[in-house]
Image: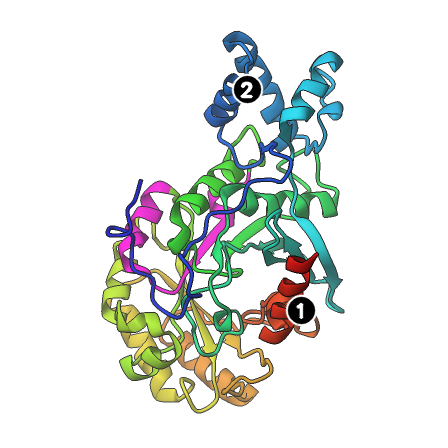
Amino acid sequence: MQTAANLMPIPGHVDPVPVPRAPSLRADGRIDLIGLTKDQLRQTLLDAGMELKQAKLRGKQIWHWLYNRGATEFSQMTDIAKAQHPWLTERFVVGRPEVVEAQVSTDGTRKWLLRSPDGQDYEAVFIPDADRGTLCVSSQVGCTLNCTFCHTGTMRLVRNLTAGEIVGQVMLARDALGEWPSQPEGRMLTNIVMMGMGEPLYNFDAVRDALKLVMDGDGLALSKRRITLSTSGVVPMMARAGAEIGVNLAVSLHAVTKEVRDEIVPLNRKYGIEELLQACADYPGANNARRITFEYVMLKDKNDSDADAHELVRLLRHYDLPAKVNLIPFNPWPGANYECSTPDRIRSFSDIVFEGGISAPVRTPRGRDIDAACGQLKTAAEKKSRADRDREAAALTVA
């Protein structure tokens, strides 16, 4: 167990409470089986009083029903004796995040505002395309990194999501899309990006454990080539992510000079551009077939000049990186201090990077009308004023 002395320091503003806070236990005392590994599931059955031989068998059966068939009730598990269903139901639950609000954009993008049993809100977004469907998954309630262009970054970190809450977002999307039982062909949900609320590498263990469940061939069975983990540059954890998770890497770069990146991605003050790019060069498995994606939000008169584009090419070539650059038109939100670069400026920037031999497509904004686009995620609860939240808390206390 980590002590306060050896926890990785977290930059940025946080609530004046111990961070991260552990999730509360369910009010009914039951254990949620979603998020448990095969071994943990078997041990949980043993701890509840099931004898060893039966726990091994039931563990395999329940695992299959959870992750391959998408069952949410023990009564659906037809190869488990009906007489045992009440025993299981009394002790365990097959959880899904509570859907507080589901929105659909005019372009087909779906956004879910989700709530955990302890009342914490977070969001997930599904983005359909002609040849793929991508689910953007959150790893934390809130965020610590306070990147100045990002609406999510204006939130306070409440706590890390558990492995069950992370994989639960994938299972909820499968529910909504009608994609049970699991099958490798014909899926609408083909890709996952860890680009929702939070910094995944500050919740490493839960993200790793959740993605292993997603990639397990006996369950959700999504290839690691179809999963991308995005980081703002938590350098000490990047090699570990490559070794222990092994999915594609995306890096929120957004600037090519120390001065600008220090402003818009404050984590740069701790891990600078050169250190970050060297960690990218050392990332296990990166090659021309599995390029590292560099996310670059286009901010008018801030990071979008021709000189910035040439410096970006120079840096990526200097570190000999197998790279692709995603140029992201800035998605406005109330109170933002930036404007989006003009289409001509974005086009010129893209052309320079392409001419440097590096792919630099411009991402088409998706879900802007429901605040589901890149950098716009921020829960409805957080949008309430502090006074509103205090009044609600006081009312609950009185009740």
Give the image location of residue 306, x and y in percent.
Answer: 38, 88
Q: Where does residue 369 sit, x and y in percent of width and height?
A: 70, 74
In the rendered image, the quadrant that contains the N terminus is top left
The residue shown at (42%, 52%) is: 248
Mark carried by residue 11? none
Classify mark 1: helix, strand or loop: loop
Look at the image and give the residue range highlighted in magenta.
222-244
Q: Is residue 261 above or below residue 134?
A: below
The answer to which image quadrant residue 378 occupies is bottom right
In the rendered view, does 100 fall on the left or right side of 166? right
Crowd tier of the residue under label 1, counting other residues whose Cα lies within 10 Å: few below 14, some 14–19, many 20 or above: many
Foreground mark, 2 or 1, reads 2
The structure residue drawn at horizontal position 39% and vertical position 69%, both measured from the top left corner, is 358
**Is residue 289 something one can see in this rendering?**
no
State yes or no: residue 68 in magenta. Answer: no
Front residue of this view, candidates 193 and 95: 95
Which residue is rendered at x = 33% and y = 82% of the image? Answer: 310
- State whether residue 225 appears in this view: yes
Is 60 rendered above or below residue 284? above
**Amino acid under disc 1:** Gly
Task: Write down the residue under mark 1.
Answer: 367
The amino acid type of the residue labelled 2 equals Ala
**305 vs 354, nearest the viewer:** 305
The residue pinned by badge 2 equals 48
Nearer to the camera, 359 or 256: 256
Mark 2 and mark 1: span between their CA atoms? 45 Å
Which quadrant of the figure contains the C terminus? Answer: bottom right
